[in-house]
Image: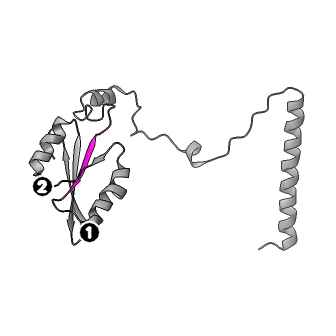
Amino acid sequence: CAPYSAVSTQSTGRKKRRKEAQLDADARRAQGEVVPRKVPRTIENTREPDVTTVAPNDAEVLDDANADELAAYFAGKGPKIMLTTNVAPTKHVLRFVWQELKPLFPGARAFKRQKFQIRDILRYAENAGYTDVIVVNEDRKKPNGLLLVHLPDGP
């Protein structure tokens, strides 16, 4: 290991060279000369191009996008979600649905299930234009399951 004075001298020399280079660049800029700035070496700009990557406007990618069977599902309109619970929910599950689950989904509406069958709820949701129905199940006053149905085709 080098003595302390040698390390100090090396860093002083490096600082001196950096300062001189900065002063030289400033003088050249003052004369109107365009001085290019050095680009730091980073992982991104030193990465070699990967031959397995595909350009976004490649014909094969465009053909795949046109033939995508889920394209209509993601075609700009957001989901309309109905949230409900099991038949006789406790206040803990209702609080979970209204305070925890509902804010997660923008535009979601929460309904008390009352005594309706799932079949009837799904018919109502489909007629009302909902895209998804989420039913929260509970066991011992704690939510323990979700039933997610995508309308109109089902789960």
Q: Is residue 2 magenta?
A: no
Q: Tell me which amino acid carries mark 1.
A: Lys
Q: Which mark is residue 142?
A: 1
Tags 1 and 2 in contact by the CB under 8 Å rule?
no
Quarter of the image holding residue 23? top right
Separation of disc 1 and disc 2 at Cα?
20 Å
Q: Tell me which amino acid carries mark 2.
A: Lys
Q: Position of residue 101 (x, y in %)?
A: 33, 55
* Residue 74 visible in this rendered orientation of the protein: yes
* Residue at x 26% of width, y 68% of height: 142
* Residue at x 86% of width, y 66% of height: 8
Q: Secondary structure at mark 2?
A: loop
Q: Nearest the camera: 154 or 40?
A: 154
Please give the range of residues in magenta.
Answer: 76-87
Q: Position of residue 121 (x, y in %)?
A: 14, 46
Q: Residues within 10 Å of mark 2 (few under 14, many from 20)?
A: few
The first of marks 1 and 2 along the sequence is 2
Q: Secondary structure at mark 1?
A: strand
Q: Which residue is mark 2?
A: 115
* Residue at x 28% of width, y 65% of height: 91
Q: Residues within 10 Å of mark 1 (few under 14, many from 20)?
A: some
